[in-house]
Image (cartoon, helix red, strand yellow):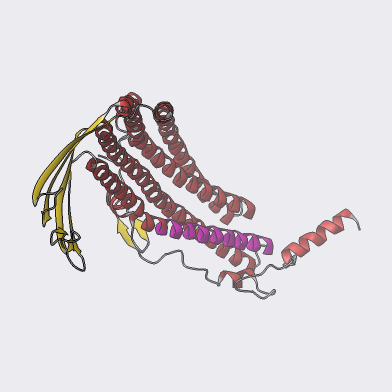
Amino acid sequence: MPRASSNLLIAVLLVGGATVRAQPLPKVQPQPSSMTPAQAMQLNGLPPELPRAEVMPFEAAVSRSLSRNPSAAVALEEIARARGVLEEVRSASLPTLSANASYTRLEQNRVLAGTNTIVQPADQVNANLFLTVPLVTPSRWVQWQHAKDQVEVARMSAEDVRRQLALSTGRTYLGIIAQHHVVEVSQRARDSARAHYQFAHQRFTGGYGTRLDEVRAAQEVAADEAQLQASVSNLARLRETLGVLVGVDHPLDVTEDVTLPGAPSLDDSLKDSLSLRSDVQLFRGRLHAAERVRRDDWADYAPSLLLTAEPFVQYPPTAQLPQYGFQGQLLLSWSIYDGGLRYGLAKERAALVREAQAGLEGGVRQAQADVRAADEEVRRSAASLKAARDAAKLAAEGLSLTNLAYRAGASTNIEVIDAERAARDADTAVAQAEDSWRQATLDLLLASGRFPSH
């Protein structure tokens, strides 16, 4: 077939509305194969609006997550458990008092053979109080102090859990704001594509346009609708995630007027990260506790001295025990050789100190790196946001000019669709750049230890 004839045939097929049939995929709502783009446009998708949810300000969401989230509750219970262990350990250094009593009944009095002398009466009562007073117990004293250190470590660990929880809540909250913007952009893009489709459809039905223009416009509407529904789905998931973080049984929505504190300078952030960050403080607390345990090795070699006192009642009195009595003892205990146990403990404690020291060095290094990276990210994301906003303005102006040119017959349908996509992508980029800038600011506040506020 000559090339000119083939080109003419292709043009006729495009204008006349011939369609290429592809292998159909399973659909939620099947459409007849003869449905035109105009009929497809009449099918309404799911509404882009989610059910109304409770709106919570940023500070309230972070505060409630720190008080109601299960992770925060578990961290507080760990402090309570450490305090309970402290009382258990402390009890070994304090006096103890116990009472004992016994009653014995025999079938009869036991007498000396051939006499009436009672050697063991049928009824016997014995009662005593037993008091133990630790006078000198160095090993117990140092264990008491070690338990106090563990309470402080548990408190620092709870602060670090709160820090991580606040970060997750803040990120999710800011993510919902950004996702709202993405939904708005997707909805505007869908509406703009629908307006373009309506114009292309009117031109085609009026005999001025082509079926190809109409199909392309309808395809763009469907693509924008798919992106809109995906954006709404992501928004629903983020709202549910925020509800879980805050500790409620329903989704939460956000306010749009979130104002984060101003980002501190790099020098201030570097200094604050060493004094305010809860993870750095936790590393220091672990090192302090490990060093104290190692320094207290001497207590394992020290003797202990206990005082015991026992008043008693014996009825009837015996040859060995009067009716009322009292006895006391001083007990000195000193372990001379224990098979090398204390030497092994000393090596273990030294290794724990080295591990804690390495952890602190790594934590400080990571904190400083976080500050520098977040500071750079704030500056770069601010510049990116400005450029994205400029690009969005230009893309919107380009779309407006392209639509005017298309309606005047000076541009093609492809140019309109490209301009719509460019405007949609530019607006989406603005929403993403805004979120990146907010997230970077939050990262810098967290890296410097200023979030959450103390």
The reply to whether residue 361 is visible in this rendering is no
218, 366: nearer the viewer: 366
Task: Judge whether residue 221 is colored magenta.
Answer: yes
Quarter of the image with the C terminus in it: top left
Where is residue 314 shown, x and y percent of the image? Answer: 12, 54
Where is residue 123 shown, x and y percent of the image? Answer: 15, 64
Total label count? 0
Left or right: where 433 falls relative to 194: left
Where is residue 336 shown, x and y percent of the image? Answer: 35, 26
The reply to whether residue 253 is visible in this rendering is yes
Task: Judge whether residue 215 is colored magenta.
Answer: yes
User: Where on the picture, by quarter, is residue 302?
Assistant: top left
Vertical placement of residue 405 versus 353, above or below = below
237, 184: nearer the viewer: 237
Q: Residue lying furthest front in this view?
A: 114
Give the residues drawn in magenta, as a range. 211-240
Residue drawn 29% across the image and 28% down it? 299
55, 426: nearer the viewer: 55
80, 171: nearer the viewer: 80
Residue drawn 46% across the image and 64% down it? 48
Quarter of the image with the N terminus in it: bottom right
Vertical placement of residue 23 versus 349, above or below = below
Q: Residue lying furthest left in this view?
A: 324
Q: What secondary structure do most residues of the magenta stretch adopt?
A: helix
Where is residue 186 shown, x and y percent of the image? Answer: 49, 56
